[in-house]
Each structure stands twice: as C-alpha cells, then as structure tokens.
Image (cartoon, rainbow, N blue to C red):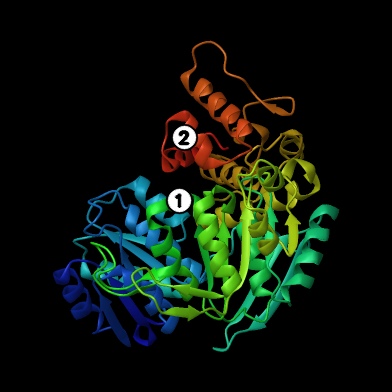
Amino acid sequence: MQLSEAKILIIDDDVDVLSAAKLLLKRHAKAVDIEKNPQKLPFLVTNADYNLILLDMNFTRDVNSGREGFHWLDRILDINPSAKVIMITAYGDIEMAIRAIKAGAIDFVLKPWENDKLVATIQTALEANPAPAAIQPAPGNTSEKGKEDKKGKTQTDTIVASSAAMQQVLNTSERVATTDANVLILGENGTGKTQLARHIHQHSKRSDKPFVTVDLGSISESLFESELFGHVKGAFTDAKEDRAGRFEEAKGGTIFLDEIGNLTLPLQAKLLTVIQERKVTRVGSNKPISLDVRLLCATNMNIEKMVAEKSFRQDLLYRINTIELELPPLRERPEDISALAEYYLKLFSKKYNRPVSDISSALIKKMQQYNWPGNIRELQHAIERAVILSQGKTLQPDDLFLKTTGNQPTTATGFDLEDMEKTMIVKALKRFNGNITDTARELGLSRAALYRRMEKYGL
C-alpha cells in the first residue's frame, strides 16, 4: 500500500508532537487522526480501519521504561492482530527496539525524528506483509482455514498439528468453535494456549468481531473491576472520563481470560456474577449493561486440585469449562519439533535478513532429546537466537544454546552465577507448576523481571 492511500492514527501525550506529526503526514497520507489519551485506543481501533498506528511508548504515568507503550501495543494487537504499529519514544535504545518488535510492533523510531526518515519508515511498514501468528507452522503440517470478514479481508490461521495429540485437540476445538460453548484451555506455560483460543475464535461465527485477551495474572485486585467491567467518570481519583471494560470491548466477539487460576476467591465471585447474569456494571454506576460475548479461559494450574483445596470456586469452574481442552507439552509430541523449528527458522531468517536456510539432522535429534521446560516459547526463542548468531547457512548443534545433560537441563556447578540463577528459576517453575506469579513471588522478582530472565535462559 502507498502512503498516499493510508489512514494513520497517532497516539502521544505530547500535543506538540501530535501537531508536528500531523502537519508532516497529512501532506503524504490520505487521512491522519491524532489522539492524546491512550485510553481511547480500544474504541478507535475497534471502530476505525487504520492502515498504520504510531504509538508513543511513554505516557505521563510512566516516565521512560516503555511499560505503557507495551501495554497499549498488546491491547491493539488483541483487538486487531494484523495491525501495523510503529513505536515512537524519546528514550529508545537497541534493547527496547528489539523488545518492541518481538512484542508485535513492525518498527521503532526515536523522537525527535528526521521527517524524511519517518516518512520512509512508514512507507516501508505499509508495504510489509503482516507478521504471522506465533505458532503458525511450516506448510504441510497444519490445520488451516481461510474466510473473509465483513471488510472483505481474508483471515487465516494455522497451527502445527502433525502429532496425534495435537490433531485430537484441534479437531475438538474446531467442532466446539461453531458453538458458543465456554471453553477452558489447560496446559503448561508456552504450550500455545493463547494461540489455541485465537484459533477457536477465528473458526467461530464471531470471527469478524473483536478477540480480546486479558492476562488476569497481571491485573492487581484493586484494578480488577475497572479493567474488566469499566468505570464512569468520577468513580475514583483517576477516573477522569467514562471507560469501557474489557468485556464491553469484546462486544459481539470473544473474550479470553488467561491465567484464571490466579484469581482470588473474592474476584472469582465477581466474575461468576457477570458470567451468570450476562451483564456488567461499570464501577461507579448502577446501570447494568447486557453482554454478548463468547468466553474462553485458560490456566497452567491444576484447577481440579484447587477446587478440592477450596481455593477455586466449583460453581465458577462449572461455568467456564463446558468444554475442556488440554494442550500437551512439547516433550510429549517430539514429532512436532522439526516442523516448529523449520517454521521459526524461515520466519526469523526473513525477519533478520540472515542467510540461514536449513537445520542439520544432528540438531533436530538434539532438539528432540531435550526436555523443553519452556515448551514452544522456549523453542521459538532458541531458534531466534541461533538464527541471529549463526555464521553458516545450516544450523548445527553448537548453534543452539541448550545446556543439557541427557533429557534434562544441566544443573549449576562450581560458582557459575548464571547457571545457578537458571537452576533456581527452573526449580521454582517446577515447584509452582509453571505459574509465573507464584514463581516470581518466591524468587523475589517482579513478573517482568522473571520473564526477562526466562527469555535470557531460554525457559
């Protein structure tokens, strides 16, 4: 697409930046909208068809960490997974740029920008093909479906499915998708629960409506109702205007509640009321709003054990698991490893413009013998690092940084602090069955810090 045909949205808390960007881009683009308040992003993305979004990484609440920018990037991609987003910041560096692209942004620019360079970056982004979903596999080992949405755009989704275990999960999910039955997806971290939920949504009658993802493990108890149910102006100190919650954002579509096992009992009760009544009431209001949403949930925890221990409400479990799907860990479907590795090799070779085009049989054997405690997410990161650092056209065993002994990760020896830290994290993850929140608390880390270390060590 040419910039002259594009409709662009710019989100930044600096009015001067918005004015300058609009003044520049309106000479090149078909239409340019600007907005200072990122809270309006869900409405704008849901109700307008933007070809590209320029998104600031730092707003008034957060000085220079980029945390808010990543939050709003996730929200945009929840609503429209094919959205093209360029992140802008005055505090950028290479690490943040890589994080932004890994998180789904198509590019990254620093302000103050050079006008010609910004225009060129936007044109390049508009010409680029949208990135594929995180678990799309190599051709020939897929479950695939294409359909047109109301705007005439073709949607496709593919998931690795060569193993019998995955074929069974996919067959069941596609039968269930055509109904409005609530689905509970179980599985370890990194097995692809979010991708399976999206797969169900894309095979459903609601596929042309929003798919909204909520990570319940990252929402504090004090913000739970406002985030999910919305609030009205004046409901609390920072409530400066009415705001729809995530349930309302998913109107007509699907809401996916990830890490539902992390909810406390009081929050479970509030969620149960909404699910039973199919109505939501914004914080500070007494006017219920009717809901038309499909509910999908997921957890990596032993939910039946939690019910037996009275830490999860049985009546809520009955409501969310009309159908229960369990994703097998990667170590139980080694026949999928080769197809996944080849898919990610192709993806990252193109992304980083690297000449790597093949994987040796010795490396495939090494990968199939590895335990993959981080499942597909770990495999993805391992292949990405190997592609970036490899000096040849074929990946060899030495290119993949898996510290293994037999089928298990190596334990720390001597005084190698990195090995010791990795071993502690692996042990804590196993102790808490892969639950990120509990593991981070045990290690004295924030969830973000734990995720960084898991990525560093390929977990």
* Numbered circle sitting on residue 441: 2
Q: Please, is residue 216 above or below residue 281 in the view?
A: above
How far across and down, in percent of the image, does residue 68 sit? 33, 57
User: What residue sits 63% from the left and 32% below the top?
Assistant: 430
SS at circle 1: helix
How far across and down, in percent of the image, does residue 168 sit? 83, 59
Q: Is residue 423 visible?
A: yes
9 vs 409, left or right, is: left
Taking depth in this image into account, of 104 and 150 the one nearest to the observer is 150
Q: Counting residues from the N terminus, which is met first, the one under dot 1 or under dot 2?
A: 1
* Numbered circle sitting on residue 11: none
Quadrant where the N terminus is found in the figure: bottom left
Under mark 1, the amino acid is Ser
How far across and down, in percent of the image, does residue 395 sit? 64, 41
Count of labels in the image: 2
201 vs 31, left or right, is: right
User: What residue sits 57% from the left and 74% below the top?
Assistant: 277
Taking depth in this image into account, of 185 and 366 the one nearest to the observer is 185
SS at circle 2: helix
